[in-house]
Image: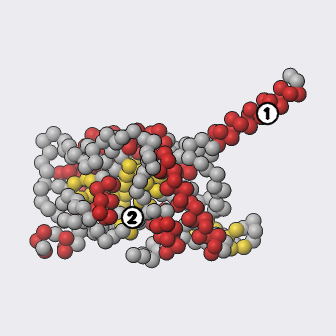
Amino acid sequence: MTTISKHILIVLAFAIASAVLLSGCDRSQKPAETNNGQPSTKPKPETKQQPESKTQPQTGPKQATIIPPAGTPIDKKVLYRNHVIVLMYHHLEEKPSAKSRITPQLLDDQIAAMIRNGFRIISMDEYLDFMLDDKPVPENAVLLTFDDGYASFYDMAFPVLRKYGVTATDFIMAGTIDNPRHTGIKKMTWDQMRELKASGMSFYNHTFDSHKYAEIDKEGHARPMLVAKMYLRKEGRMETTEEYNKRIKEDIRKAEECLRKELGNTRGVLAFPYGRYNNALLKAAKEAGIEVFLTIDQGINAKADRIGYRINAGNQSMTPDKLIKKMKEAIPVKTTPQSK
């Protein structure tokens, strides 16, 4: 092989490798320095502060059509009005390897129990219309959400959701999608999300690539990287306030741009990683056009709760009966019809 031929092959190989790394949504943002995502202490909630689409037109129902199992009686009792309970899930497995992972059958049983007890599962569009546009929601309204964009949402959760004719939202880390450098549990692809969106599912912001812990001092203590200045170990110094604000603003902006580019999103919702947030993060998100947020604090959401609550239903110990009990416990007395 001649020297010229070798040179040509090297150039072609570099071009192909570059194309693979930059495929999908742009990932040119430099990864932040972290402590490999391991928390030093258990996270605690921060103080609460109050385009033309490239996708095909959505064919799924905007308002979920509840299809109960044959012969299942539906409790028509009104438990609450003008409020929404938001449920949180993560990963599904046939044989769960962690407490925070559930089987498709448990998800099926939970949804069936909600229907039997008169809960009405709504879409994120309906939730945002309620929060932002003063539109009504059904009595006993419930929103289903999943975090992290795992492939199990496509493979295992969606068949269950489709069985009952209901929708759900998945909050994704945009920088991990179609990324050959991503390690860990398999994620959905943009193509899979476009397919699910056409069937009524929706996808929103869980950061670009900041669902991690980062060192905050030279001793190695760590906190969620979106809510704290990082210790830059290579430089032997703390991140400045200006650097911190620029970093979080860039991360949230890039995630929003990916969602708009790949899925045609026109509205913004952010689920805080680990449920943690501060004023700087709220400011950065609002500058990116995000007006509605979700934490991991338990409760029920009124129209004024732009920073909303979620109940963790994605737990192996959360039997259908336990979940229904927890949902009913979240209902304040003032929301019941008897108190009107």
Q: Locate residue 211, reporting x and y percent.
A: 53, 59
Residue at 22 percent of width and 61 percent of height = 136
Q: CA distance from mark 1 to mark 2?
A: 49 Å
> Is 215 left or right of 257, judged from the image as shown?
right
Disc 1 target residue: 10
Dot 1 falls on a residue whose secondary structure is: helix
In the rendered image, the quadrant that contains the C terminus is: bottom left
Name the residue: 64% across, 60% down.
32
* x and y, in percent, of residue 40 in the image: 58, 68
Q: Residue at x 27, y 44 (%)?
A: 61
Residue found farthest to the right:
3
For residue 271, side relative to residue 215 (left or right): left
311 or 32: nearer the eye? Answer: 32
Label 1: few (<14), some (14–19) or many (≥20) C-alpha neighbours in 10 Å: few
Mark sitting earlier along the chain (1/2): 1
Q: Quick check: 57 left or right of 255? A: left
Whether residue 297 is situated above or below residue 97 in the rendered picture: below
Q: Are marks 1 and 2 in contact (CB under 8 Å)?
A: no
- Disc 2 marks which amino acid? Val
**Residue in the image at 12% along x and 41% along y:** 71
Q: Is residue 94 visible?
A: no
Relative vertical location of residue 27 with respect to residue 81 in this rendering, above or below: above
Residue underneath mark 2: 292
Q: Which mark is residue 327?
A: none
